[in-house]
Amino acid sequence: MTVRAFVPYPDKRLRTPADPVNAITETVRMIWDDMVETMDAMPGVGLAAPQIGIMMRLAVVDASDRRGQAVRMANPELLHASVQMRRHEEASPNLPGVSAIIERPRAVTVRFLNEAGEVEDRDFVGLWATSVQHQIDHLNGRVFVDHLSPLRRKMLVAKADKLGRG
């Protein structure tokens, strides 16, 4: 397993929808392994393949209190979102040094291909739900700052640029 480097914002890959995964192959499993290791090294609670330059609809999420509970997903899609919202401070290793409070549905139902290559529908609540939605955004070519007003987004991106050059 390898800790992968992050694609720096505003790389166009972060704005490009990822390609669907046709089957769970040994290559997909190796990418997932690297993604989990990379996520744990951040440390973070989720990672989408485009964040490390792999343009496949792959994501991993682990919002557990202890590591080793990662859910590996291919082609995750939102089936249902709760009406009740949850606010959480989100960040991304692609835009280091900045974060923002983002409001998202508190609970979601997601359909994805699991490690066995089977279609699975799973409910996620709280931080798990926030992270899954954040990763699906990445797979669709969106980053967390896209949920902000244009002015707030511009300010955060400028701050991240300044920190990167610092």
Image: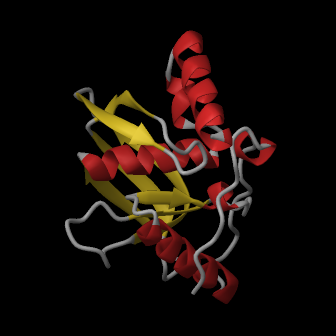
Q: Is residue 147 above or below residue 15?
A: above
Can residue 61 be seen here?
Answer: yes
Q: Is residue 10 left or right of residue 128?
A: right
Q: Is residue 30 above or below residue 56?
A: below
Q: Quadrant of the N terminus?
A: bottom right
Q: Is residue 14 above or below residue 86?
A: below
User: Which residue is farthest right?
Assistant: 12
Rendered location of residue 72, percent (x, y): 46, 70
**Residue 143 falls in which quadrant of the image?**
top right
Residue for point 35% across, 65% down: 62
Rendered location of residue 63, percent (x, y): 29, 60
User: What sort of colour scheme is used for the picture?
Assistant: secondary structure
Toward the viewer: 82 or 102?
Answer: 102
Rendered location of residue 58, percent (x, y): 59, 63
Q: Is residue 68 left or right of residue 61?
A: left
Q: Quadrant of the C terminus?
A: top right
Q: Is residue 62 left or right of residue 153?
A: left
Q: Is residue 81 above or below residue 55?
A: above
Toward the viewer: 90 or 147?
Answer: 90
Tag count: 0
Can residue 24 be seen here?
Answer: no
Residue for point 71% across, 52% down: 18
Residue for point 58% across, 83% down: 29
Q: Is residue 50 left or right of residue 113?
A: right
User: Which residue is farthest front?
Assistant: 166
Rendered location of residue 120, percent (x, y): 42, 66
